[in-house]
Amino acid sequence: MFSWRRKYHELCAEQKKLIYVLMAILLASIGALIGLALIPGKFTLHKEMTLPRNPGMLYFHVNTIDQLNKFMPWVDQADTTLHLNKDGKYYKFRRFALKDGTVVRIRKTSENPIYDVGYELCVNNDYDVDMKWAFSMADSSSTKIRISLLTKIPFLNRWRYFRIRREVSERLDSVINRFQLFMSDLQKMYRLRMVKDTIPALQKYLVIHGIVYRMDYAKQLDRDLPDVLIYALQNNLLKRGTKPIVVFPSRKKDSLEYYVGVQIKDTAVSIPDKYQTYYIPRARYKQFEMRGDYMYSSLAYREAIKRLDASGEQFLSDRPYYLEMVEGHTRYPKDPSKWKMYIYLPVADQNSKDE
């Protein structure tokens, strides 16, 4: 009768040693697999920062892969040739081959109308990262940004869990530092100079009035301004040489009231309820000229107030201020350096200052 015990005793010492080695390898492999199964396959890191910028401006700088890559440490040395790889029907990965051999593939996965955006990154096929940028108002002039990274590690790479976690954390800190440094240097994106004192003439404007959540203002303005301009053109109301204006009569933490429109002929006319006529309040204003992308107008506005304070002028924050889009945005849409805007800030009369 066949017996495993007797068969084992008949083996030589070398064969027995080989069996022990194979059993040890098998037990070690089972232990390693159990250990890998116990190591988490994913982790999430969160970081927050608050910047004195409006959300629309901050969102603009992360809303495309080209913009995002300015702050990503793993694409600093990216090749100038970008390889496009299709992923499914709708999305494309953008592939960056770095000088150190690292390969990063990035695609945009989501976008939401209240300034949230998501990306998926695959680093060397070692792990995937779902990156989410979320923007919310901190106060009337600041935005809170929350960056979340959900990192997913393949099963066979889990033994590198702690190394990958440290690497992702360091890169997240680098992204935040780069982003803050870039935003602190935004004044170089525009030029501002004080022009003159002015009291605007009594002029009639056709406007749309709105009160919106601050984070929705830019998108709403992009809809309202063409709307009122087209109506004025179609009904032969537009005054020759007019420039679009935006008036801000009040400013609160979460909401923004505005009038946006164009100057029209001073004739009696019936207009739909959607529109209304408006006259800029007669007052003394300081006129500033801004050169650069209109998206930086809020920065220029705050800088103009600082200049007023430094010059001893009293800015009347409870009065409406307004912007006039002078030239360039239609003639040179791809060259914002040629755009010009006037910012009109209400200031106290000389007589009231002397008193």
Image (tube, helix red, strand yellow):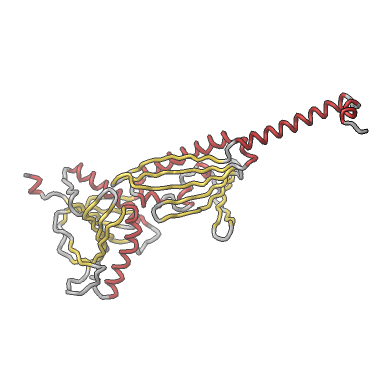
Q: Is residue 223 placed above or below 348 in the rendered structure?
A: below
Rendering coords of residue 20 (x, y %): 80, 27
Residue at (20% x, 54% y) in the render: 320
Query: In front here: 118 or 124?
Result: 118
Rendering coords of residue 12 (x, y %): 89, 25
Rendering coords of residue 244 (x, y %): 27, 63
Q: Is residue 340 left or right of residue 94?
A: left
- For this orientation, the residue located farthest to the top is 13
Rendering coords of residue 48 (x, y %): 40, 40
Residue at (29% x, 68% y) in the render: 229
Q: Is residue 352 left or right of residue 182?
A: left
Query: In front here: 223 or 103?
Result: 223
- For this orientation, the residue located farthest to the left is 355
Q: Is residue 28 left or right of residue 82?
A: right
Residue 9, located in which quarter of the rendered image? Answer: top right
Residue 35, located in which quarter of the rendered image? Answer: top right
Q: Is residue 19 left or right of residue 197?
A: right
Residue at (82% x, 29% y) in the render: 19
Query: In front here: 217 or 280?
Result: 217
Query: In front here: 194 or 247?
Result: 247
